[in-house]
Amino acid sequence: MVKITDVARLAGVSPSTVSYALSGKRPISEQTRRRVQDAVRDLGYRPHAGARALASSRSNVLALVVPLRTGMHVPVVMQFVTSVVTAARRFDHDVLLLTQEEGEEGLRRVADTAQVDALILMDVQLHDPRLPLLRSLERPTVMIGFPLSPQWLTCIDLDFRAAGEACVEHLVQLGHRAVALVGSPPEVYVRQTAFAQRVVQGFTAAADRAGLRSAVHPCEATPAAARRIAERLLREQPALTGVVVHNEAVLEPLIEAFRGLGLNVPGDLSVTAICPADLAEHLQVTAVALPSEQVGTRAVELLMEKLAGEPVPEATLLPPALTRRASTAPRHA
């Protein structure tokens, strides 16, 4: 049976654009409409009557799927939620927040009703099990995060690989030769959460290019775990002078632990981070800020454009911006 995704692939558009071209609910350019019609004719596609009715209904509600899994730092998640809700209101849309572990069955249950017009999904995994369903949905979707194979999806996020590289490159410029990454809790890596994996990739690639001695250490999100990691780093890497932290919950206790072990930051140890700007400013840590407001706002804008039948880029990667503060300094000779 020919599916709407088959038509979309042949026409070079999204499934939602095919739906709007067929229903007439949203304005579509004549060129795009012709491509869709040609693909429909060539493939012999026949839209289901129920699907046509579903595509023409509007609830002015967006679903935001944020499974609250272990290892997630909820305050940071809520920054993204707030930005999505705020942006949605500017388009006269409300937001239905779904925090359970919504697999394919849960997503289909939401998408197959008239509850929502479109969906935004967070906590994306490299091999996300929701991808096949997302590619088949007629309702527009946007993922905040990049799976390993993002083809035929609309994804937006900070370029976390480049963020990991930027932190290491800053330390290299300051003359540091031994560095470590204090990363997310172990379960985040076990799930192969995309943003955490890409930070590791960027950190490792930049360290290898510069010929640095480096190590990666997942860390539970507790002060006690931060103290244990600080002790382990100094024991296993006595030449360590640069640390990258990608774990907001342990950033402050980790710095305190290093100081408790007799190290001066930044005199003896330079610390960089990937974290919210307000936290970095409060602690005066050199950091790549998480652009939660920009990501959430643009995710909503992409959905609105898709609802209007307009073409959107499949990938939107925001470049990292590193702000230097008082936590980094040149390495002592």
Image (spheres, rainbow, N blue to C red):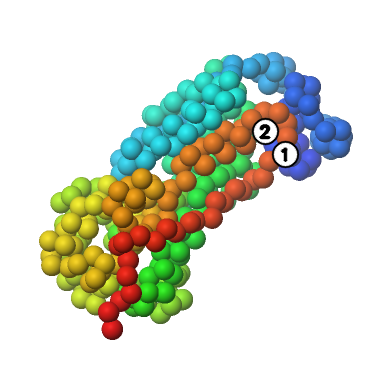
> Which corner quadrant holds the C terminus?
bottom left
Q: Is residue 122 left or right of residue 40?
A: left
Decide if residue 185 is in sight here. no
Q: Tell me which amino acid carries mark 1.
A: Pro
Label 2 is placed on what type of residue? Glu
In the rendered view, tell whether residue 178 sits above or below residue 63.
Answer: below
Determine the residue positioned at 55% across, 51% down: 318
Position above or below: 227 against 83: below
Return the x and y of residue 90 as percentages of the image width and height. 57, 25
Q: Residue at x 29, y 67 (%)?
A: 270
Left or right? Give the position of 277 relative to 293. left
**SS category of the residue bearing label 2:** helix
Q: Residue at x 54, y 55 (%)?
A: 319
The x, y position of residue 110, in whole percent, is 52, 23
* Mark found first going from the N terminus, 2 or 1: 2
Which numbered marker is on residue 77? Answer: none
* In front of the other: 1 or 177: 177
Q: Is residue 108 above or below residue 123?
A: above
Q: Which mark is residue 305?
A: 2
Q: Quadrant of the N terminus?
A: top right
Which residue was labeled with disc 1? 311
The image quarter containing residue 226 is bottom left
Is the residue marked by circle 1 packed among few (<14), some (14-19), or many (20+) residues within 10 Å? Answer: some
Q: Of residues 15 and 233, which is closer to you in this image?
A: 233
Q: Are marks 2 and 1 in contact (CB under 8 Å)?
A: yes
Q: Is residue 177 visible?
A: yes
Left-right relation of 83 to 90: left
